[in-house]
Image (spheres, rainbow, N blue to C red):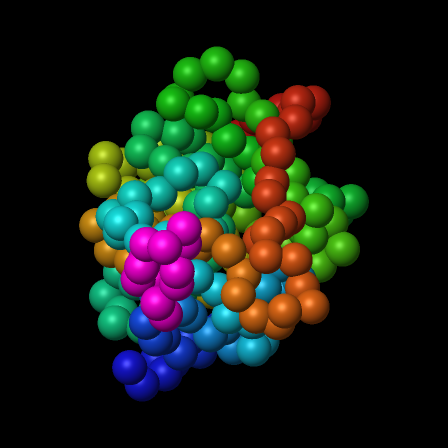
Amino acid sequence: MNPRRAAGAVLGTGVLLCLLAGVAVTALGVRVDGTSMSPTLRPGDRVLVTPGSAGGARRFDVVLLRAAGKDALLVKRVIALPGDRVAIVSTPDEPFQVLLQEGGRGPVRRVVAPSWASQAHRTSACCGPDGTRSARPELRTVPEGAFFYLGDNPDLSDDSRAYGWGALDRVEGRVGARALPVSASPDIGNRPVLEEHRGPSP
């Protein structure tokens, strides 16, 4: 398959045949170009998409998807799932605070990713009714069949803030492991965690 150009990434895809315990498993191999997922995934990294995971997404997984209205493939991080409420708040001290209320109930908590603190410097507010950037922060409910996604390098990522809610049926699969470079850990890493949110909710 020829490389496909995406906003913030160029993805070359191919089929890899892996032998696991004597059983042949076909996996989709993806080459990442671009810095939208840096430092989690760097240009030239090759990752494996989990077989049978098309159309599925789990909170904080890295997935291969097609953005709404685009044929290009993207590799991004799932942040919120159907029924969740999500917002991005900017303050002078912290320009990128991602807030999440799981299932639309209970406490609003903060999504904390290891890479964001050192890379997020531009102010950003979200979300509009379609999941894109907004003039002020507002908690929005992710619609049925949709999800909200971000890049791990938020200042240099075109993601839901640009394209709106992702569609679950446009998820090509979950990224399961890093195949290359061999010197790097196969684990994708930098998985966000949820922490208490001490500030006011939008």
Q: Is residue 131 left or right of residue 193?
A: left
Q: Is residue 56 left or right of residue 149?
A: left
Question: With respect to residue 49, does 58 lie above or below?
Answer: above
Of 46 and 193, which appears nearest the observer? 46
Residue 180 in the image, given as x and y percentages of width and height: 57, 70
Report whether residue 102 is seen: yes
Residue 20 within the magenta-colored segment of the rendering: yes
- The residue under the point 43% across, 61% down is 48
Q: Is residue 197 left or right of residue 145?
A: right
**Which quarter of the figure has residue 105?**
top left
Single out the residue that lies furthest toward the bottom.
Answer: 2
Residue 134 within the magenta-colored segment of the rendering: no
Residue 132 in the image, given as x and y percentages of width and height: 40, 52
Quarter in which the N terminus is drawn: bottom left
Single out the residue that lies furthest toward the top.
Answer: 106
Residue 21 in the image, given as x and y percentages of width and height: 41, 51
**Which quarter of the figure has residue 14?**
bottom left
Of 136 and 31, which appears nearest the observer? 31
- The residue under the point 63% across, 69% down is 182
Report whether residue 159 is seen: no
Magenta region, main secondary structure = strand
- The residue under the point 31% across, 59% down is 24
Q: Which residues are magenta?
A: 16-27
Question: With respect to residue 108, does 137 lie above or below?
Answer: below
- The residue under the point 27% across, 36% down is 143
Question: With respect to residue 76, does 78 lie above or below?
Answer: above
Tally of numbered tags:
0
Of 71 and 101, which appears nearest the observer? 71
Residue 104 in the image, given as x and y percentages of width and height: 39, 22
